[in-house]
Amino acid sequence: MHRNKKILFDGDQAELFSKNYSIKCSCCDQCSYISPLECNAASNLPSEVLTNVLSSIKGLKTVDLEGSKFYKVDNLPLKYIYFECKKCHSKYLSFFGLGEYQPARFIFKLLLIISIE
C-alpha cells in the first residue's frame, strides 16, 4: 500500500485532461499510464471496499446530500481508477483527489494505491 500524497498535476483544466500520468508498479517498476478521464466517483465502489479503504485516506470527509454519500479529501472529490501492470499483470486500485481548487485551477492528486488480487 502506497500512502504518500503526490500532486500529479496542478494547472489549467484543458491541459489536465489532455495528458496521461505515469504510476510505477510496486512489483516490477514498470510505468502504467492513467488519465483523469478514467476516474470514477469513490461513492460508486461497493460498500465493503469503501469500508476497508476509507480509513487509510487521511483527511477524508463524508458529505451527505439528499441520501447520497460523497467523499472529499482536501476539498476535492475522491475518485478512483482500477489499473493493471502490463508487464507483470499486478492489479491496483488507486485513489485521487481531482477537481478545481481555485477558480480555473485544477489539481490531480494521488492519495493511495492498493494492490488487489
Image (spheres, rainbow, N blue to C red):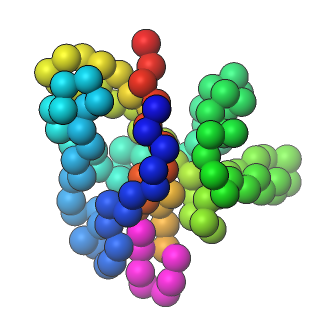
Q: Is residue 52 depicted above or below 10 in this figure? A: above
- Total marks placed: 0
Which residue is at a point 52% across and 76% down the rendered structure image? 101
Q: In the current view of this chain or complex, which residue is farthest to the bottom?
A: 103
Asked whether the viewer can see residue 62, the reply is: yes
Which residue is at a point 21% across and 59% down the rendered structure image? 19
Asked whether the viewer can see residue 96, the reply is: no
- Whether residue 71 sits left or right of residue 67 in the image: it is left
Question: Which image quarter: residue 50?
Answer: top right
- Whether residue 64 sits left or right of residue 92 in the image: it is right
Specify start and end residues of the magenta stretch as a single range. Answer: 101-107
Q: Main secondary structure of the magenta part?
A: strand
Which residue occupies the foreground of this view, 19 or 73?
Answer: 73
Q: Quadrant of the C terminus?
A: top left
- Whether residue 35 sits left or right of residue 45 in the image: it is left
Which residue is at a point 22% across and 62% down the rendered structure image? 18
